[in-house]
Image (tube, helix red, strand yellow):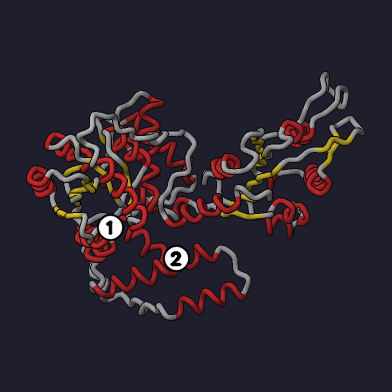
Amino acid sequence: MNKLLIIDDEPSVRISIKAVFNREDVTVFCAATVNEGIQLAAEHSPDVVLLDIKLGPRSGLDVFHEIRRIDPRSLIIFITGFGSADTAIEAMKLGAYDYLTKPLDSNQLTRVVNQAFAISRLAHVPTIIDEGDRPEDKPDRLIGSGPAMQAVCKQIGRVAPQEVNVLLLGESGTGKELVARALYHHSRRNQAAFLAINCAAIPESLLESELFGHERGAFTGAAHRRIGKFEQCHGGTLFLDEVGDMAPHTQAKILRLLQEGRFERLGSNDSISVDVRIIAATNQNLDSLIQNGRFRKDLYYRLSGVTISLPPLRDRREDVAELAHYFLFRGNRQLGTSVQSISTQGLDLLQAYDWPGNVRELQNVIRQSLIVSAGSTILPEFLPAEVHQHSLSDNSTAEVEEDLAGRPLPAPDWQSLPRVLRNWIAGGETDIYRRAREQFDQLIILDVMQHVGGHRSQAAKILGLSLVTLRAKLRSMDR
């Protein structure tokens, strides 16, 4: 008989997991607290333990050692609703069998636990269990488990293998180059070259030479032949960042290359054939540039075989904590610091800030905070002044417990959402996903606010949001 111990403080999680393993060959034990879990582990020596990482004031990473001391043969699988690469790495370094994130997929859960049961049956055989490859902490990664970023990742997975050009749209600092690299690494061209060029950072007089190359004597100062980026990327991928800043003459040459697959170096009449996939990116409104005659419409259609829009950080606040901790641990390695965490108040400030510089600004803020921090935790006073100034600043008890019952709140209209969505589609609207998500947020938040009579603290507890995040969302609804 296989014995499974579940240690999780969420009743719904315990119930759902127990239902998945409601079968004759498994005995399931459930614990809601650390002490209860340790007692059950001591009494029953479970083969497999499903251990939540967040257990009130205790960390599952600490509980791991206590269970291992009781029975080193127990295989421990961490489960958490706050998944991050750093936590996964730490869990696997401890010797965990696996690491799963909530909401749990029943098929994946069954497969992983069944594998653990099979290995547990060999516990008395003197052999070494191979834990497999441990998660790799790569410096260039797309971070974000929220719906907005997950939607982008799904698009990358669908588009990367296809031989189409891709246009990336988004504000500065949203991670367009990381997405471009992900598209390249998951493409059929990942064994060929990947080159990036920032069209806004190179003077117009030099950009054409950078892209197409030149012959010796093509212009003053051209003392040698130069091979351009397109030629260097033959068979590979070229990332054209800030393509909206490109001069009209250069746009025309790129259009011809995309149409014919050929170009000439500056100062040469010989055509060169190339096969290059282009990933272009811009933070500008290309529709507006086209209307103003600053960007060619035909080039736009050639570049936008598929368009991926990256959400600004203020529209994916649920990812701020994950990103902040990733930059914290990465910054520790780079700066030689040893800060271990960010305080709850600090995270509230980070989540309430609007991040005009997006992910790049968040990275810089965390680096600054690591440098000035005293101790093992980033406290609010270690965060830059702009984070305090632009966050919601009135945190008085009166405001936290403010009764909004007198404020007219529109009744949630769930039935109208499908009709609104159909109207958007019929009207040719773009950015529908973001707009629908905002509509959904408004419906659910106002519904809960009505339920609690307008008390923000009660609503935040029901929604599972911090007070700062809830106030930020309410403020955005008033705009």
Please name the residue that numbered disc 1 is placed on.
467
- Quarter assignment of residue 197: top right
Residue 146 position (above or below residue 189): below
Category of crowding for the residue at label 1, using alpha-carbon neighbours closer than 10 angstroms: few (below 14), some (14–19), many (at least 20):
some
Give the structural element (helix, strand or loop) at label 1: helix
- Is residue 366 or residue 50 the one in the foreground? 50
Residue 19: tell me if it is visible: yes
Question: Percent position (x, y) of residue 282?
Answer: 63, 48
> Gap between marks 1 and 2, in whole Å?
18 Å
User: Left or right: 297 with respect to 5?
Assistant: right
Give the structural element (helix, strand or loop) at label 2: helix
Residue 55 position (above or below residue 269): below
Please name the residue that numbered disc 2 is placed on.
438
Number of marks in picture: 2
Residue 324 position (above or below residue 19): above
Going by the numbered disc 1, the residue's amino acid type is: Leu
Residue 400: tell me if it is visible: no
User: Left or right: 462 with respect to 286?
Assistant: left
Q: From this viewpoint, which residue is outermost toward the top?
A: 223
Question: Percent position (x, y) of residue 150?
Answer: 46, 53
Question: Percent position (x, y) of residue 51?
Answer: 22, 47
Q: Residue at x 21, y 46 (%)?
A: 49
Q: Residue at x 51, y 76 (%)?
A: 420
Category of crowding for the residue at label 2, using alpha-carbon neighbours closer than 10 angstroms: few (below 14), some (14–19), many (at least 20):
some
Q: Residue at x 81, y 49 (%)?
A: 259
Residue 93 position (above or below residue 146): above
User: Left or right: 270 with respect to 325?
Assistant: right
Give whichever of discs 1 and 2 has the lower sequence position: 2
Question: Percent position (x, y) of residue 119?
Answer: 28, 40
Q: Residue at x 76, y 40 (%)?
A: 275
Going by the numbered disc 2, the residue's amino acid type is: Glu
